[in-house]
Image (spheres, helix red, strand yellow):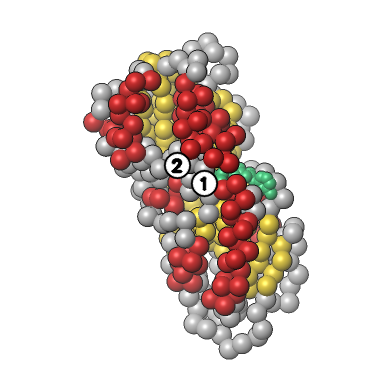
Amino acid sequence: MALGRVIYVAHTVCIRSELQPMAPDRIGSSSSSRQRDLVFVVNPLGANGRTGKEWRKLVPYLRSRLGKECNICESITSGPCHAIDITREAIREGADAVIAVGGDGTLHEVVNGFFWAGKPVVSQVKESTHSTALGLIPLGTGSDFARTFGWKNDPHEAIERVARGLRSMIDVGVITGESCDHHYFINVADIHLSAKAGFYASRYKRFGNLCYVIGALQAFIGHQNQDMRIRFNDGPWETCPQVTALCIGNAKYFGGGMKITPNADPFSRNLEVVTLQNFKWYDFVLKLHKLYSGTHLSVKNVSDRSVLSIEVEDISGMGGGIYIQSDGEHLGFLPKKISVVPAAIEMIL
Ligand SMILES: Nc1ncnc2c1ncn2[C@@H]1O[C@H](COP(=O)(O)OP(=O)(O)OP(=O)(O)O)[C@@H](O)[C@H]1O
């Protein structure tokens, strides 16, 4: 998307600045003086419509802060999964960064847009010497991924990060199932009760963070802990009895601020697996504060380990009834294999 080239990203509007003397090159490692192409992928309906409103207020500031150095391209999503296509196209067109504007769901789709058929999407621009970075302006309901970095839902702070342009290679997780499709996540993937709670919570986003409480209460109805077959790092299969929830973290938080995988680190080149077994409803009432503070690893029936991969099968006889979600998005049911993809994406930090 260098100057003079046409951008074919659907619904993308590029707010190009007047030609001006170049500012110092802060975004990316290239020393060329060309303007950077930043594609902002905006979910107008994130956080029950707040994302769209905040974004409209933000655009004038964004132009004044970055417009001299960068071509600012705005791409408004038209529905679920659109952010994936926008991202793929932007990368192929040689964008310097694709920046998700919204919640974890939008970030999740943008991350999936960095891949195609199990491989990274690459620029088709012949002269391109840079890779496309991932950025985030957190403006969602939960915005859980941002919490690992201590980022708030503060768009001005996020724009400063983009302006500063520090980048680092970050891990992602990949989930494969019987269909052999590859599905990527950047935050937390989780199985059984929490995934079911997330599935229901997505229906109540209009209530803000309360949606997670409502979702959890609904998921408890008829919930049963289940035996599962698990294997770590392609090792031997073992039975894990009475699993309540299995959480696989690349980062630390889910469910609107629960520090579920407190030792996860997206730069560690592995994933943290936290297993809750044999929990009853009253265990959640008594131990909820520990789940929020991340001090639950010492609680009875909670275990924790660091892995490269984990494979999980349903042996409950529930016939496809055990939910899995990734980054708060419903992904279907077991069996699934979840693996780390080390240093998969360059992220603006
Ligand atoms: N134009 C659109 N219309 C309807 N849904 C959309 C649109 N664009 C994106 N989506 C969907 O909205 C869902 C939620 O978006 P997002 O994650 O940004 O907000 P949120 O749910 O409020 O925040 P969080 O996930 O952090 O709690 C995503 O799963 C995405 O597929």
Question: What's the amino acid at mark 2?
Answer: Gly
Say above or below: 231 vs 83.
Answer: above
Q: Where is residue 323 in the image (x, y as percent from the top left)?
A: 53, 25
Q: Residue at x 50, y 55 (%)?
A: 138
- Tag 1–tag 2 contact (CB < 8 Å): yes
Identify the element where label 1 is drawn.
loop
Mark sitting on residue 141: 1
Instruction: Quadrant for the C terminus, please.
Output: bottom left
Q: Which of marks 1 and 2 is nearer the N terminus?
A: 1
Relative side of 80 to 343, left or right? right
Q: Mark 2 points at which residue?
A: 256
Residue at point 38%, 39% (across, down): 258
User: Is residue 47 left or right of 223 when viewed as pictured?
Assistant: right
Give percent across and percent down for residue 239: 39, 16
| The furthest residue to the front | 207
Q: Does label 1 point to a residue whose CB lies under 8 Å from ligand 1?
A: yes
Q: Is mark 2 on a helix, strand or loop?
A: loop
Mark 2 C-beta closer than 8 Å to ligand 1 = yes
Task: Please name the residue shown 37% across and 55% down the image.
Answer: 150
**Looking at the picture, how far across and down is residue 80, in whole percent?**
67, 44
In the image, residue 113 sits, relative to residue 95, either above or below, namely above
Expressed as whole percent of the image width and height from the top left, the position of residue 311 reads: 46, 27
